[in-house]
Image (cartoon, rainbow, N blue to C red):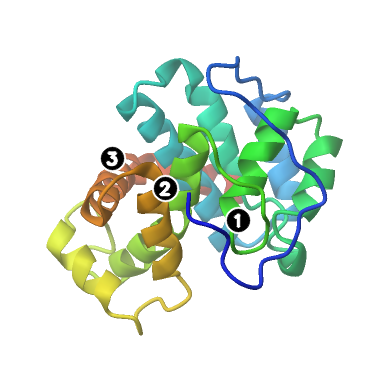
Amino acid sequence: CPMPMAGCHKSRGKYIVTEGKTMETGLTREEALQALQTYNHAPFHLQHALTVEAIMGWFAKEEGFEAESDFWRMAGLLHDIDFEQWPEQHCVKCIELLQSAHATPELIHAVCCHGYGICTDVEPTLQMEKILFAADELTGLIGAAAKMRPSKSCTDMELSSLKKKFKDKKFAAGCSRDVIRAGAECLGWTLDELLEKTLHAMADTESNVAEELNLLLQA
């Protein structure tokens, strides 16, 4: 992966994992949702967590890691567990929160490294970690673009439309284009490949995410 961007902060812990190791999470999805909702209450943050969970499951299948889908999904679900309440300690405070929830070191590493070069120096090494790093910011861009459409959906969005939004630096300016480009490079994908796959993943999972969010908000 590219080197960290200037101004990144050191994390307080590194968790090393090796390719091919059994990926255990340490907690059930129900326990993960409980932990997420303990620290996250805004519908936007809950929707983002569910969206990234869903696309990570999609990518696990797409990349031939379906047997590890539960791990990929949980990393997506919990990746921003600390962001709503501790934005200045993002990818650092999560270590404490996830340890309290009995998450494994492997899951903690996966969560921490999605902020590589932004708020941590923990580098993504596994394919799953690289995809989480690459796709996280992009889901925000795609979600913002979908809200501008008459359908309010990404299911009818074409790649060409997304590329126009990507090139427009004023649109969804908080979604870092540099991070998205770095993510594609980290994976050895072209930018178009990353855009197209993530758009496809979000389109395929959009309805399920909406249902999950409604259930959470009604509980």
Q: 167 left or right of 5?
A: left
Q: Check disc 3 and report its element: helix, strand or loop.
A: helix
Looking at the rendered image, the disc whose residue lies closer to the viewer, 1 or 3, is 1
Q: Earlier in the sequence, mark 1 or mark 2?
A: 1
Residue at screen point 60% across, 56% down: 115
Q: Mark 1, residues whose alpha carbon is within 10 Å: few (<14), some, or many (≥20)?
A: many
In-front residue for pair 215/33 = 33
Vertical side of 41 occupied by 168: above or below: below
Residue type, numbered disc 1: Gly
Question: Which mark identifies residue 115?
Answer: 1
Q: Are marks 1 and 3 in contact (CB under 8 Å)?
A: no
Sequence-wise, the earlier of marks 2 and 3 is 2
Q: How far is mark 1 from mark 2, CA to CA?
A: 13 Å
**Residue 133 vertical placement versus 128 (above, below):** below
Number of the label disc, if any, that sits on residue 204: 3
What amino acid is found at the position of numbered circle 3 in the picture? Asp
From the viewer's perspective, tell me whether residue 180 is left or right of residue 89. Answer: left
Nearest to viewer (mark 1 / mark 2): 2
Distance CA(mark 2)–CA(mark 3): 24 Å
Residue 5 horizontal/vertical position (percent): 56, 67
Residue 154 % position (x, y): 26, 56
Q: Using the rendered view, name the quadrant where residue 127 is placed.
A: top left
Tell me residue 18's x, y (percent): 60, 24
Q: Quadrant of residue 215?
A: top right
Q: Could one spot residue 219 in this view of the protein?
A: no
Left/right placement of residue 45 relative to residue 65 reads: right
Measure how far apart labels 1 and 3 are at the Cα level: 26 Å
Q: Secondary structure at mark 1?
A: helix
Question: Which image quarter is the C terminus in?
Answer: top right
Q: Which residue is mark 2?
A: 186
User: Mark 2: few, some, or many residues within 10 Å (few <14, many ≥20)?
Assistant: some
